[in-house]
Amino acid sequence: MLLWPLIGLVAFLRPCKAGQSGVDEQCDDFTDLDFHECFLGTTLNVKLLLYTKANLHCGRQMNHHQLSSQPLLNLSLPTAFVIHGYRPTGAPPVWVDHIVQLLSEQQDMNVLVVDWNRGAANLNYFTAVANTRQAASNLTGFILNMQAEGASLSSIHMIGVSLGAHLAGFVGANLKGKIGRITGLDPAGPMFTGATPEERLDPSDAMFVDVLHTDMNSFGLQGQHGHIDYYANGGFDQPGCPKTIFSGKSYFVCDHQRSVFLYLCALNRTCNITAYPCSSYSDFLDGRCLQCEAFKPASCPVLGYDVSKWRDTLLRLGQTKAYFTTTATLPYKKVSYRVDMVTWNQYLRWGVVILRLHSGKNFTEACADRRLIRFEQYTSTRLLIQFDEDLQPIQKISLRIATGNVIGPRYKIRLLHIRLTPLEEPDRPLMCRYDIILEENIEVAFRPLPCDSRL
């Protein structure tokens, strides 16, 4: 028996709450299993819990066949299916209530939480993987019943987490790719690495497929599996997550479950994370993919629910990779600047650029230290520099070029100009400064000036 412990999220019990009328209602809750049930094994049973604006805090279990007897289900509205992944401890996901609330804020819709915990809660991961096919068959039948009652397949959006992403893909494949959208949050990697498109989530499973990767070197799946694949921090290790096994369960689950928390933050519109289409994470960090020319007049793609501005372009471009970096904690968003410099110095120097932005007594610092930059006569350099804080207004900029020279004389470096372009805030002014003389390893401070339109 192959064990995959510690992938599940921490459990919680959701109490029934009063309905809009103020009268206590009998709510149907997500299945909560004991650990011994996971150890002994359970028989797959798929429950569908319906949430609408009329019962936002009180899920109602759906009858899979008699949809006309479900007064809360409005088939003329869009429907979002939320599908969890592997649950080795049998506990409900901690994020279910949160995603239901946030989805309901996007537009008037039906939210159906797919509770297949009795198929996903098993210490034998192979059993949970095998159950995805049967659960997908069950969901397919339900959606066909919806269609027979007047629902449009194009109005269906399936959001699958980990193993749930592949389950959503199987449903989409059963329906010949005619459902509107599948969102995969760090699709599961174990047992799916090297699988054919028919054996995992892929772009043909829906009219539009978007995928977020956060743990490709462990529980997540590497590669491209959607019309657009977002790679947070390259899709591997996430900032703030433990780096050693001594941190306990968090070491195993933190990177993987970050996909859910990033998506929740995006739904809440507090993150507003911009992603940059690029061939590789390395090229993105080196500032080679900051223009998003293919998406104009729209902006670069943004992680989240509303993809209408970019959908047609993405479908035309084919499979697209998009990269972004985050901070370790909410709201995760970094503040990105494109920095363009032209140097003119007598001696060839190599170094990294360290910038500080000052607003009053506060400052934020960032270092472009991925590679050494060549400074010589008339050298043009473009960098991506990202700050953890968004300070406004910027009253002063500090610049240091660190060369590592601690013994010999300090050489002077002349900047003909430096320009900082805010990437995600096009309404903010560009910041420039002209003809600066600085010494290597010594910080120089200056007030930004309006940029010359000729540059």
Image: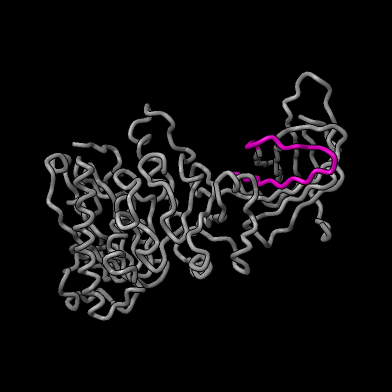
Quarter of the image for residue 347 reads: top right
Q: Quadrant of the N terminus?
A: top left
The residue under the point 36% across, 56% down is 98
Q: Quadrant of the C terminus?
A: bottom right
Q: Residue at x 15, y 57 (%)?
A: 45
Task: Determine the residue located farthest toward the bottom in the rendered image.
Answer: 150
**In the foreground, 91 or 416:** 416
Q: How many marks?
A: 0
Q: In which image quadrant can residue 66 be found? A: bottom left
**Side of 399 where 111 appears, left or right:** left
When the figure is inspected, residue 300 is found, relative to residue 95, above or below; the finding is below
- Residue 273 in the image: state x and y as whole percent: 53, 55
Q: Is residue 371 magenta?
A: yes
Magenta span: predominant SS is: strand
The one of 14 and 309 positioned closer to us in this rendering = 309
Question: Which percent across, then down, holds residue 241?
Answer: 44, 37
State the image coordinates of residue 82 (x, y, percent, origin top left).
31, 60
* x then y, percent, for residue 226: 42, 58
> Is 321 on the left or on the right of 179, as rendered?
right
**What colouring does the structure picture have?**
one colour
| Residue 212 highlighted magenta (yes or no) | no
Q: In the shown orientation, is residue 389 left or right of residue 9? A: right
Q: Residue at x 41, y 62 (%)?
A: 209
Q: Is residue 415 left or right of residue 223?
A: right
User: Bounds of the magenta span?
Assistant: 369-388
Q: Quadrant of residue 97?
A: bottom left
Q: Is residue 232 visible?
A: yes
Using the image, determine if residue 305 lies above or below residue 66: above
For the question of whether residue 24 can be seen, the reply is no
